[in-house]
Image (cartoon, rainbow, N blue to C red):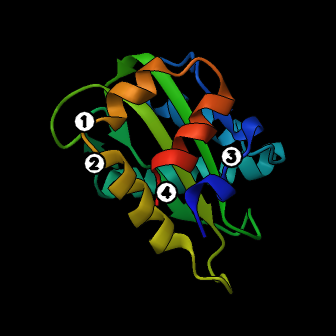
Amino acid sequence: MKLRELFTPEGVNLRLKADNKDDILKELIQLLNLEEKSETILFKTLKRRENLGSTGIGHGIAIPHCRSLVVNNLRLAYGRKPEGVDFNSIDGELVHNFFLIVAPPLEVSNQYLPVLGKIAQFAKDPDIPERLKEIEEAQEFLDLLEERAP
């Protein structure tokens, strides 16, 4: 399965408003269109994951991810904050691009780790951070995934 197939235009926000890590996570979670209680649970789960070690992988990219009972299938969202946010990234740089991955504790398709790997591979392409900066519409993000993502 290609990454492009896992994203929808509704799950893309190119103008995140938050100025800190917690609020960025909350904005990303909102892209999944969950109930308020589920959003709260998911936020706490993602925070616990971030406390283990930042999901900021460098080059302006973070991949917050977790498993949670609030979803019954793999869900992804993408958000961009052009000004960047301190996300305790491994390279110490601000993060501009956020790929959220949430999977149920048990998933038949077992896509969680392969998808995490595909996003990391996509993000490590030297052209990608610059290409992500240039995107104006959600469809352009989806087209870039179609063109360049595994």
Label 4 residue SS: strand
The residue labelled by disc 2 is: 124
Say which amino acid is labelled 2. Lys
> Amino acid type of disc 1?
His
Question: Residue 11's x, y, as percent?
Answer: 70, 40
Mark 2 touches mark 4? (CB < 8 Å): no
Q: Is residue 54 visible?
A: no
Left or right: 39 in relation to 143 = right
Residue where numbered disc 3 is placed: 40
Residue that lies at the very extreme toward the right in this rendered image: 35
Q: Is residue 108 above or below residue 43?
A: below
Q: Is residue 84 visible?
A: yes
**Badge 3 vs badge 4, beta-carbon distance below 8 Å:** no
Answer whether labels 1 and 2 touch (C-beta < 8 Å). yes
Q: Point out which mark residue 26 bears.
A: none
SS for callout 2: helix
**Residue type at numbered disc 4:** His
Q: Earlier in the sequence, mark 2 or mark 4?
A: 4
Judged by depth in the image, the label closer to the viewer, 1 or 3, is 1
Give the residue at mark 1.
59
Give me the residue at 67% from left, 49% from top: 7
